[in-house]
Image: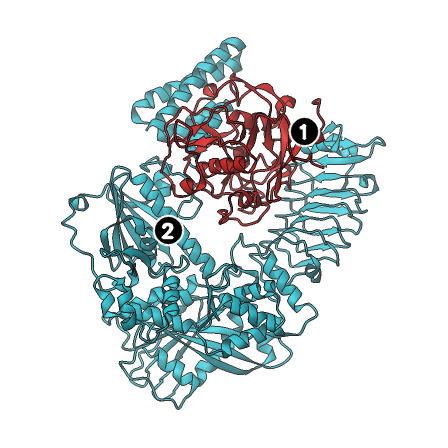
Amino acid sequence: MQKLTVDLLKDLKLTPLDNVEAVRRQGNAYALDREGKLVAVSMTEKDLEELYLDEDCAHLEHLYLGRNKKLSKLEFKVALPELTHLYLNDCSLKALHIPAGFIALKQLYVQNNQFEELVFEGDCPELELLDGSGNGMKDLVMPDGFRYLKYIHLQKNLLESLPECFVGMRQLDMLFLSGNPLSTISQDVVGSGDTHNSAPDILTYLMSIHGKKTRYLHEAKMILVGNPMVGKSSIRIKLKDPQAPLPEENDRTPGLDVEPYLLKNLPGHLTQLDENIDFQLNIWDFGGQGRYREIQQLFCSRKSLYLYVTSYDDQPDNEDYIGLDYWLSMVNAYSFDQDAAEASPVIYVLNKVDSRDDGINETLNREKYKNLVKFVKISCKNYAGFDQLVSNLREILPSVSRDIFSNRFNLEWFRVKARLEGSNAQHLTYGAYLGICKDEGLDTKEAQTWLTVLDRIGSVIYTGNFVNKEDWIIINPNWVKDAICRVIDSPLMQRDGILKEVYFDTIWSEYPDAADRANLVKLMLNDKYKLAYEITSLEGETDYMVPAALFNKGKPALNRYPVLQQAADYTFQFCFEPFIPAGMVNKLLVSLNAYIYNGLIWGNGGVLHDASSNTFALVEEDWQNRRIQAEFRGTNPAVFYEMLVTTLEKITEDLKNSRFLHHLKPGIKMKYEGDFLDVELLKKFGKFPWEEHSGEAGFRKTNPNPTEKERIRRELIANDQLLEALEAMETLLPEEEYDSFVNTRGRLKNLDRDVRDGTISPQEAGLERNKIRKAVQNLCDTIKMK
Amino acid sequence: MTDMSFAEMEHRQSLPNGTSFDLIRIKAGSFFIGNSDNEIQVPDFYLAKYPVTQALWLAVMGGENPAHFKGTNRPVEQVSWYDAAAFCNALNRLCDYPPRYFCDASFQKALDFSMTLALNYGDSLPIFIHPENPGYRLPSESAWEYAATGASQRSLYDYAGGNTLDELGWYGENSHRQTQPVGLKLPNELGLYDLSGNVWEWCEDQYQSEESKIPADGTAWTHGDAGAYRVLRGGSWPFNARFCRSSLRDADHPASRNDSVGFRVMLFPPPVSWPGIQTSP
């Protein structure tokens, strides 16, 4: 193990500089104080493996050891009381202990090492930033203190809990925890997404349970999926009451039904709790009909257990039949836990075995979907197999989510939940909710965090942003679902999908209140749901287009529009894996409704038109093949294409963030010489028809900025890396420039040879190089013009 | 060393609503821009110490926070060049300066946010820049690079203030795929923070590819069409280190809104006096 000394730094050829700031700026340097003690060290990419610091380093104010890939061990034999910045990022440290006495430390970067625990042996009272991400850290040990800690990055570790001292970090402004298997704090509090800042909700939550009476939230969803008429509602009914009569054959579930079901007396060996508990499963019974699928996904959320139900008569020729692949792909996309990279467990239920038992090919299904964990045959008619079903439910519940049994919340918060659930109202205003919270002892911050949690677990629907006290909180999601299903089902809507105010009395006869109707419309228009958009009728009235209601309307004949009869200039496919969320094209059309051409919109597509460039985009959803196809015709498809990509990215991102839909992977293909090829591949070979502009990675895998390729080339030229610049443009050059390219490259190679051989004077070489640079620059410009 | 101490070079601009932001005085001088032999004479000016934060944006513009990565002390992003220009006009109004950016050649119709907000990618709006009006504006790219490279103390560092980007800015290797609060990293020699990384910064110039065409008097090059790309400088959170070099030039459509692009303001000419403005502590 080497000791950090001035001699070592000299051996490593670090530059001695005058002061700390100079060392920080220059890098690979060090500075000493008047007594010859080290005050600053900055070194990177050295071959150091093990290092220790003793009292000779006690005056260090700055230590940068980042990106020393081989550094696996670092020991502080003494505290460094004057150290303000410590960089140990991107090394290979296997352990890290910070002794007590780092009293001046302001910033600590230890990300991307390999230590399992980070131990602070004392308070770091000045620490404002800690980056400990990407370490596989199981334990973070911090004593009380750290009162000025504002920014904490702990992504991609293996933390199951946070140190107690977090509750005292009142300055905490940013806290990132994605990728940790936290079990003592609900994921519903932590939130979802790599860039989601959990600080406000976590702080509020921790304070709400610190020294307060708490209770576990033992509640989850059980979602019944499968095609129509396989008996999902019967299972729901029979689970609740074995004696209850089965629904009539024609009594189909409109959209979904929700009912609570109690799994009683779960033993400690299942829950890891001291006592046996009762656990509430809220059964969400999804109507199997295709037209409801868009609405159903609004009600998907994490922490769900799925039952896939099928039966002998569940056959491809049935109305609305879709195969197991769709349902399992949907389940997997809505998977509960991105951190564990596991999909929610699914029980495969074969119903109606009293009529016929075709058996289940368990091996084949399990091979395909690893989360198909149980297979059970039942008959709702004679209640056969239900004991096994219930036993399976109890068994797989622990694997639904690692925090399923360990989530605790403040008792006062539970009282708010109970009051909401006990209310007969369908909704209340945000202001009224705050009133209830105040009654129960919650302050506004706590009320907001609790509302966020309730929305995430699906107890309520809230689309506001904690500002307008008149905003709705829906406490009966079923009530909203029914209202939207009535719109979609109404014969009045089938022709053109337009909801008019004059229809309200017919469609929403059970929703007589004008304010309710106005709010329901507002909800459908809400950006989060994208179920409708406003249009103005010929009479000047405001109507609402609901694309989902056009499920029966086929693609119209487009022969009135000659331009749409022409071959497409470009055809793209936006491909979704593992499945395309239902209604994706509807959301796209709602988002881009200002561009819908002449009202051309139908069940699975529409025509968009950009008047400024006179460009058309015909978009259609190919649901079974999990893609949206877009055909472009007109003068400026690049801008329209960009708009489509950006919009689809945003819809996908919104779904991923709001619905915990982590496994949705979109990609783009373009038709090229008859085949659909990945656009990334086409770009690589310079066959993509235009250069992309703004936006972030999503559909686009390339860097987001517009002129990146050009910038790289220009930078290479500017840095005099002319050969590299030439190589970077080789595949992109117009054919007629190829001779010039070969000639320029030859001149460059000759020049390098002549310089190496000393057969050319520096001045001549400089002149020739300038000429070559100019030639490379010209070649670069031809690409831009192209 | 310059003949002014840091304290003398720094000023705090207070706004009527109680918000304030800091500016750094940049002394006049000349430098060769990028890797060219184009020598630029840059006059005295002030440059904001940080990119415009979301707090400052909201204090000046009100309304909704456009940023994707929310945080009052994070830079504002998802603002187009037009939005940034409208911000400068709004800031000038608050600080009793005339507008800088106009929609007509007779300088009657000042650009405002209600106009720019409606613009989408690909839309272009002719902008007329008043050549003499004093006040806040977007920096010219030469002023930006001059300040980034230490102005009269011209440094030879790769990035603004040094060679170790981990110490200086937020980029693809350390940003966690998002913007970060301003002012956490080491400032450059002049006390300017976050010039390298965090967000690209809009400059007033329209983009043209030749460094030699950048005006030698330190003003912005604005001879392109209405929709010509505008210059971006400094690199940003998703990019690797090479894009954060002080000399690197990039550009985007002026109506583009991107979560890796923000801006900082410049004040020119330096006021003769600073009524109501306190020197920073």
**Which numbered disc covers residue B9?**
1
Q: Which chain is red?
A: B
Q: Colour of chain A?
A: cyan
Q: Quadrant of residue A104?
A: top right
Q: Chain of mark 2?
A: A
Amino acid bearing label 2: Leu
Foreground residue among A772 and B13: B13
Query: Relative to A399, is B215 above or below?
Result: above
Q: Chain of mark 1?
A: B
Residue A22 in view, yes or no: no
Cα distance, mark 1 to mark 2?
48 Å
Foreground residue among A571 and B2: B2
Residue ranking furthest to the bottom: A243
Location of the C terminus of chain B (image quadrant): top right
Q: Position of residue A455 (x, y in %)?
A: 49, 66
Q: Residues within 10 Å of mark 2 (few under 14, many from 20)?
A: many
Foreground residue among B89 and B32: B89
Tag 2 secondary structure: helix
Marks 1 and 2 on same chain: no
Name the residue tied to disc 2: A648
Residue A408 placement, left or right of B105: right
